[in-house]
Amino acid sequence: MIKQFSISNNTLVEADDGVVIISINPSQGERSSLCAAYHIDEHTLSSALDPDEVSRFEFSDDVASLIWKHPLNCSSKDNFYFNVGSMGLFLTQHQLIVVMMDDMQLVGTTVRPMKFSTPLELLLVMLLETIQHYLDHLKVIKMIAHDLQKRINMSMENDHLIQMFNLSESLVYYVNAISANGIALGRLYSHIIKIHAGEHINEMIDDIVIENNQCYKQAEIYSMVFSGMMDARGSLVNNNMSMLLKNLTIINIVFLPLNLIAGIGGMSEFSMMTQGVDWRVSYALFMIAMVAIGWFTAYMLGKLNFMKLNPFDVFRFKRNKARKHP
């Protein structure tokens, strides 16, 4: 799909003969038409649609070609996996051709929008919009990471840990893409200096370079923090599982002698041994004995540090508290 736009009051207005041509996922015939009409190299155009292509800037035959990496939209259905894509920006003397795989908002998303009235200014504004998109995603990643950390602390499932791994992998791709964009920006900056585009354009490209460097540093720091904490988070999940197994083992140990005694009490031998005693008294004593044995077993486990808190210590604490505050 190919659309043409004209520039009016810092906005793009659809027109039949515009200075901005936007092509979204072009077919083979549309690619050939773009290459023939605007003298775009066919290999460079194909690279603009390759998500694994590295950012670069080339200038030949009065056409400045920029392959630019931009973040893709993400949702919770993707397990918080943030990915990057490629887009091609081809600048001729009077027109700007934009080629990309997915439709996305090109201008109007930054907090402080920049003015543009020419195709070159629009190209720089689009680069700034992309960098701001990266920064917004980094903020979202940080918020998601904090939420996942709280859930990992209370959960022993792998779902949250997998989402954390996805965020860590996404940050690696972001660092690589932003770094490659910085190299392409350097070549674009040199080209703008050579063609003497003007002081206003030089200031715009300076701002973009600074924003990209800050974005790269922020993404690099996040990536280092995530990679350093992944082992700790994995150990935390394993520790939670170990604590659960420990608690289940304690419960089994406490009830193991009780099951044995209950099995004996359910047989006829117990009635034979207590035939001279009223059954109400014998079974009451039997229940008291089971409770005492269970309580004694829990006490011994507490003394051997199998339990975090001895149940007798809890009882003493409550009794002393009641004496202090009658």
Image: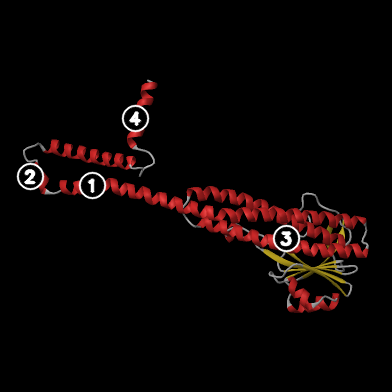
> Camera-side residue: 136 or 212?
212
Residue 190, image x, y percentages: 87, 63
Choose the circle earlier in sequence order: 3 or 2.
3
Q: Where is the N terminus found, in terms of image quarters?
A: bottom right
Residue 200, image x, y percentages: 90, 55
> Camera-side residue: 299 or 60?
299
- Judge from the rendering whether residue 140 lies leftward or rightward of residue 279; answer left or right: right
| Residue that carries the numbered disc 3 in the rendered image | 178
> Camera-side residue: 283 or 294?
294
What mark, if any, has residue 316 been given in the picture? Answer: 4
Choose the circle earlier in sequence order: 4 or 1.
1
Give the SS element for disc 4.
helix
Mark 4 burial class by Cα count in 10 Å: few <14, some 14-19, many 20+: few
Residue 119 visible in the picture = no
Identify which amino acid the numbered label 1 is placed on: Pro
What mark, if any, has residue 272 been given in the picture? Answer: 2
Q: Nearer the viewer, mark 2 or mark 1?
A: 1
Q: Nearer the viewer, mark 4 or mark 2?
A: 4
Residue at screen point 74% across, 73% down: 47
Residue at screen point 45% across, 50% down: 240
Give the SS element for disc 2.
helix
Choose the circle earlier in sequence order: 1 or 3.
3
Give the SS element for disc 3.
helix
